[in-house]
Image (tube, coloured by chain):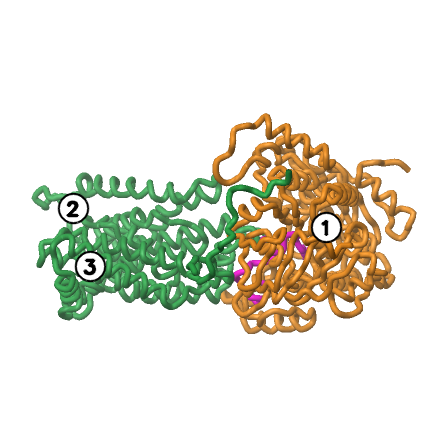
């Protein structure tokens, strides 16, 4: 039956090269209208490049695109959108200080002044697709989920038929993800085509009609989702071999608290403080996780604990010392290592070599004199590269050329080598492929044998797989701390994340 | 078939080798057009410039004399810019270097043992520039005041203070009313070489270029400076004290510019007088950028600019062209570099003309 329907989009042998590296090699793909496609692949498999070609950001070196039977050449994202292909990037392209409506109407070139008509159209679309968001709100005040809805509305308002999403669930909570999938299904019912990039296999199983898998720049398989029997099948398709998804969690005796936070409160900005009355302790031998919907204060709390942002009230006991909120930032820097969420912009310097990045947070360990001990730095980096199997260029090559997973492993190696009493890991596997996630998880589990680990993650599966105890934050407060061993608590955690404190 | 310009995917930290020759060639070509417009055969003009700069040992020594302050201010700008600080205030720092060197040479020297006079004069010059640069440094570090504006505006204040001094309290009483201080004693003058006006400043500048290069590349301090310049957010994460670094780097940058002023006063003019603030501070910005902030390239670029300045003066003397011609050439050279640098990030690719280029008529669903 599907054979008789002409495809909405056909990619014919697309290739794209960056320097000597083929990001896409002879990629062909046929897509039908009214279906949801999941695009899978490890980091660096070429998914983002392919989607950037489809959305007009890159031009292919060879091969062509046919849209509704006509060959098209996009010179820019604006042209692609004009033709009905729009993309929602992982980092939202919204102006924080403008309202939802203004963001949706914002575009290059002249803006037609028929705002009332447009607003009516936006309201209509929001209603039709279940995209609840208030048009007059300023984007700055929106949650990540709401911002994503604005992005979708922006595309729908411009009459996009093919909507591309780059890891749309990475910043969403469990409930928000389900909401997004409901929107996907409504879009499909209206005959729209959805392509979404993901690393999460359960999402594929939940919503996709078709699955396409890329590996090393090539399209390696395309199949209907119902042909896939298990998540292991998919994982095998992605990495080309069996990967373990169940985490071995060797038991570790839990020791004394390394850090105790009491009554921590963040500085009050224009509204209420980002976090309030935070009490918890992290003990040697455990992974203590703070989870919650993005934007409920975890980010600000971690920044304050890491000493990058001020605290307004409360005390922190670290090791044998108790610090007041004001003095916490002036404490000696040793004893704590921190893996920040943004590995490209905070955790590393792209133009620096692997060696230079390896010494970033431990400069004093490399050379006592005026000079950096380059020999020692290179030796240690080479060891770390070997031990963590960091691939991509030599140790003197720029870290900016590493893939996300390899960069994260470099940062991890660096922070672990500081032999911290407390390791703070913030969204440690966000955007990583299956193999890299596995590596990072194993490293964190190993680390809790020698230190306390404080993990902050929005990925419930990650929290449940690794943690010993889980604290759930909602609107700046810790609602409860539950044991991760008790499976009955899992549903409760979901409720707590939504702010429901029922017992 | 058509041509289109495409952004290069890999942004390399290194500039392709052709960029500098290309921008230099561009400057020569545009300069030739300007000469033609002025009614001078470009070949004649460039001949005069070359002869003026390299015609004899004496001529070339003048090129070096001009290059010395350019080397020092070029290093000053390059150091600050490595940490993303825009020190546009080298002119003012140079002036304060001159004021303090002159002050030390005139008023401290009589009270000092002779062997200390020169070191104190040199140190006073460096300190003068450093302290003047401290103002925008502190404003930037603690009050987030934009250092481009504050350092630039302080230039005018420095020049007015200098003029006040040599027109007023420091004016030479035996100077027949000419504006300027008395001459520095021999002991407060830096040594000269080869019977020319080439002075100790050259040795100082070359040593400092090497030291700065090595310090930025191999020292822990230099690592921090480069890290902050490339990614302040990561530097903050690494726990670097950014405020302290800003102040330190501005002090050093100002000291380098101050040394340029000291060298001009103590090596060329032998007094504080008109002609100290002739734009070496601003030219330092051009030198630093043409050298791509590489301290080792700074002396070479400074020599090139010195050639332009001396050659330009010859155009005025021999062909009666306006002296500002050398400034025009400098400007064209800088624009040429900026242009080629931008172009280096793109490439020209040939591709079939898009017949089905989308039109503004969208494919809106009915």
- The CA span between labels 2 and 3 is 40 Å
* Residue at the image position 34 percent from the left and 67 percent from the top: B207
- The residue beneath circle 1 is A318
**Subunit ID for the residue under disc 1:** A
* Residue at the image position 17 percent from the left and 40 percent from the top: B167
SS at badge 2: loop
Checking the image for residue B180, the label placed there is: 2
Query: Which chain did the image draw in orange?
Result: A
Segment colored magenta:
A335-358
Q: Nearer the viewer, residue B171 or A451?
A: A451
Q: Position of residue B200 (x, y in %)?
A: 25, 64
Q: Are marks 2 and 3 in contact (CB under 8 Å)?
A: no
SS at badge 1: strand
**Subunit ID for the residue under disc 3:** B
Q: Colour of chain B?
A: green
Closer to viewer: mark 1 or mark 3:
3
Checking the image for residue A418, the label placed there is: none
Q: For the residues tagged 1 and 3, is the chain the same?
A: no
């Amino acid at each position: 039956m599907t054979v008789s329907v002409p495809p909405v989009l056909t990619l014919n042998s697309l290739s794209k090269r960056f320097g000597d590296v083929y990001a896409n090699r002879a990629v062909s793909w046929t897509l039908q209208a009214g279906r949801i496609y999941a695009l899978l692949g490890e980091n660096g498999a070429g998914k983002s490049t392919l989607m950037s070609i489809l959305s007009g950001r890159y031009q292919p070196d060879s091969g062509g695109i046919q849209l509704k039977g006509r060959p098209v050449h996009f010179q820019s994202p604006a042209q692609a959108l004009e033709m009905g292909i729009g993309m929602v990037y992982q980092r939202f392209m919204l102006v924080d200080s403008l309202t939802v409506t203004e963001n949706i109407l914002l575009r290059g070139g002249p803006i037609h002044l028929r705002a009332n008509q447009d607003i009516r159209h936006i309201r209509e679309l929001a209603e039709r697709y279940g995209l609840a968001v208030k048009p007059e709100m300023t984007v700055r005040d929106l949650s990540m989920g709401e911002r994503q809805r604005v992005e979708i509305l922006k595309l729908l308002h411009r009459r996009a038929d093919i909507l591309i999403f780059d890891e749309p669930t990475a910043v969403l909570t469990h409930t928000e993800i389900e909401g997004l999938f409901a929107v996907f299904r409504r879009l499909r019912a209206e005959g729209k085509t959805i392509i979404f990039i993901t690393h999460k296999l359960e999402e594929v199983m939940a919503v996709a009609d078709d699955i396409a898998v890329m590996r090393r720049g090539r399209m390696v398989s395309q199949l209907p989702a119902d042909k896939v029997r298990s998540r292991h099948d998919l994982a095998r398709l992605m990495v080309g071999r069996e990967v373990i998804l169940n985490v071995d969690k060797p038991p570790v005796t839990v020791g004394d608290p390394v850090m105790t936070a009491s009554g921590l409160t963040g500085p009050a900005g224009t509204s209420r403080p980002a976090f309030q009355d935070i009490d918890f302790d992290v003990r040697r031998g455990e992974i203590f996780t703070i989870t919650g919907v993005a934007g409920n204060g975890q980010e600000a709390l971690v920044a304050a604990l890491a000493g990058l942002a001020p605290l307004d009230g409360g005390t922190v006991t670290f090791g044998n010392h108790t610090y007041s909120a004001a003095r916490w930032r002036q404490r000696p820097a040793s004893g704590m290592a921190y893996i920040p969420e943004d590995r490209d912009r905070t955790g590393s310097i792209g133009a620096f070599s692997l060696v230079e990045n390896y010494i970033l947070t431990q400069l004093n360990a490399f050379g006592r004199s005026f000079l950096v001990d380059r020999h020692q730095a290179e030796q240690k980096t080479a060891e770390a590269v070997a031990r963590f199997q960091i691939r991509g260029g030599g140790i003197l090559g720029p870290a900016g050329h590493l893939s996300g997973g390899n960069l994260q492993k470099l940062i991890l190696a660096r922070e672990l080598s500081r032999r911290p009493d407390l390791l703070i890991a913030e969204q440690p596997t966000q955007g990583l492929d299956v193999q890299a996630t596995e590596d990072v998880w194993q490293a964190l589990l190993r680390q809790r044998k020698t230190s306390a680990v404080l993990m902050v993650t929005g990925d419930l599966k990650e929290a449940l797989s690794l943690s010993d105890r889980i604290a759930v934050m909602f609107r700046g407060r810790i609602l409860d701390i539950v044991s991760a061993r008790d499976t009955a608590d899992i549903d409760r955690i979901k409720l707590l994340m939504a702010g429901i404190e029922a017992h | 078939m058509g041509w289109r310009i495409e952004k290069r995917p890999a942004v390399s930290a290194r500039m392709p080798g052709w960029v500098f020759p290309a921008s230099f060639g561009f400057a020569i070509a545009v300069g030739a057009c300007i000469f033609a417009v002025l009614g001078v055969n470009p070949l004649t003009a460039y001949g005069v410039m070359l002869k003026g700069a390299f015609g004899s040992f004496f001529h070339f020594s003048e090129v070096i004399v001009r290059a010395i302050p350019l080397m020092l201010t070029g290093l000053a700008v390059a150091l600050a810019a490595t940490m993303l600080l825009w020190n546009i205030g080298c002119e003012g720092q140079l002036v304060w270097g001159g004021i303090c060197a002159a002050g030390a040479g005139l008023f401290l020297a009589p009270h000092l043992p002779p062997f200390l006079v020169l070191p104190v004069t040199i140190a006073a010059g460096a300190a003068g520039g450093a302290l003047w640069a401290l103002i925008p440094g502190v404003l930037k570090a603690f009050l987030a005041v934009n250092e481009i504006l504050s350092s630039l505006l302080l230039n005018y204040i420095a020049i007015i203070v200098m003029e006040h001094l040599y027109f007023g309290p420091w004016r030479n009483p035996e100077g027949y009313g000419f504006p300027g201080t008395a001459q520095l004693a021999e002991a407060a003058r830096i040594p000269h070489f080869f019977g020319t006006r080439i002075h100790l400043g050259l040795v100082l500048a070359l040593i400092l270029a090497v030291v700065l290069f090595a310090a930025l590349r191999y020292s822990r301090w230099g690592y921090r400076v480069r890290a902050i310049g490339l990614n302040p957010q990561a530097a903050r994460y690494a726990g670097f004290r950014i405020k302290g670094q800003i102040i330190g780097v501005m002090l050093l940058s100002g000291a380098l510019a101050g040394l340029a002023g000291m060298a001009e006063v103590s090596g060329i003019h032998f007094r504080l007088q008109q002609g100290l603030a002739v734009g070496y501070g601003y030219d330092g910005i051009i030198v630093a950028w043409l050298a791509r902030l590489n301290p080792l390239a700074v002396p070479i670029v400074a020599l090139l600019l010195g050639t332009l300045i001396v050659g330009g003066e010859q155009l005025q003397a021999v062909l009666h062209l306006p002296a500002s011609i050398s400034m025009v050439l400098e400007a064209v050279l800088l624009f040429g570099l900026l242009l080629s640098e931008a172009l280096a990030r793109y490439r020209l690719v040939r591709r079939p003309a898009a017949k089905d280029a989308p039109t503004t008529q969208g494919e809106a669903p009915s």
